Image: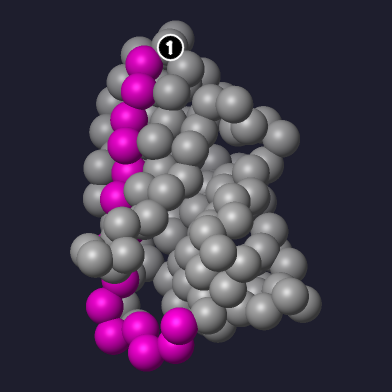
Amino acid sequence: VQLQASGGGLVQAGGSLRLSCAASGRTFSDYVMGWFRQAPGNEREFVAAISSWSGGRTYYADSVKGRFTISEDNAKNTVYLQMNSLKPEDTAVYSCATNRANFNTNVAAAREYDYWGQGTLVTVSS
């Protein structure tokens, strides 16, 4: 499985960005796609996820709920992260990840994901 993330950049506080993560080579139908981020000096943290096995249910970290939206275009095998009302504390390298999933999967845990894309840097200026 290969994941290609894109869409990062520099934006002012209050602005918006949309990240994309295109998947190829994935042969399993029950999966979860997640976004994680890591700021300098911080641990990697969960941002959002969408699961196919639960009919497209979405999950969000409290810090982004109401501002970020995760969605998927199945025809393009691409997951998007629409980020609105960005804050300087959202500055980080954002990475997408995927793996098989079922009702036992903790979608917010990085250890649940076997396949990772390269990160894309999001910088929010104040």
Amino acid type assigned to the residue bearing label 1 in the image = Gly
Q: Position of residue 72 (x, y in %)?
A: 38, 55
Q: For the view shown, which residue lies furthest in the left direction?
A: 76
Residue at 53% x, 59% y is 56
Task: Identify the colour scheme used.
Answer: one colour
Residue 40 visible? no
Residue at 43% x, 23% y is 84
Q: For the view shown, which residue lies furthest in the right direction?
A: 104
Residue 108 visible? yes
Residue at 31% x, 57% y is 73
- What quarter of the picture does the C terminus occupy? top left
Q: Is 22 covered by the magenta stretch?
A: yes
- Looking at the picture, does residue 12 appear above or below residue 1? above
- Looking at the picture, does residue 16 appear above or below residue 118? above
Describe the element under mark 1 as helix, strand or loop: loop
- The magenta stretch is 15-29
Q: Residues within 10 Å of mark 1 (few under 14, many from 20)?
A: some
Residue at 49% x, 64% y is 33
- What quarter of the picture does the N terminus occupy? bottom left
Q: Which residue is mark 1?
A: 14
- Looking at the picture, does residue 68 appear above or below residue 48? above
Q: Position of residue 25 (x, y in %)?
A: 28, 85
Q: Is 28 covered by the magenta stretch?
A: yes
Q: Which residue is at the front of the view, 11 or 84?
A: 84
Q: Position of residue 66 (x, y in %)?
A: 59, 26
Left or right: 32, with 122 as reference point: right
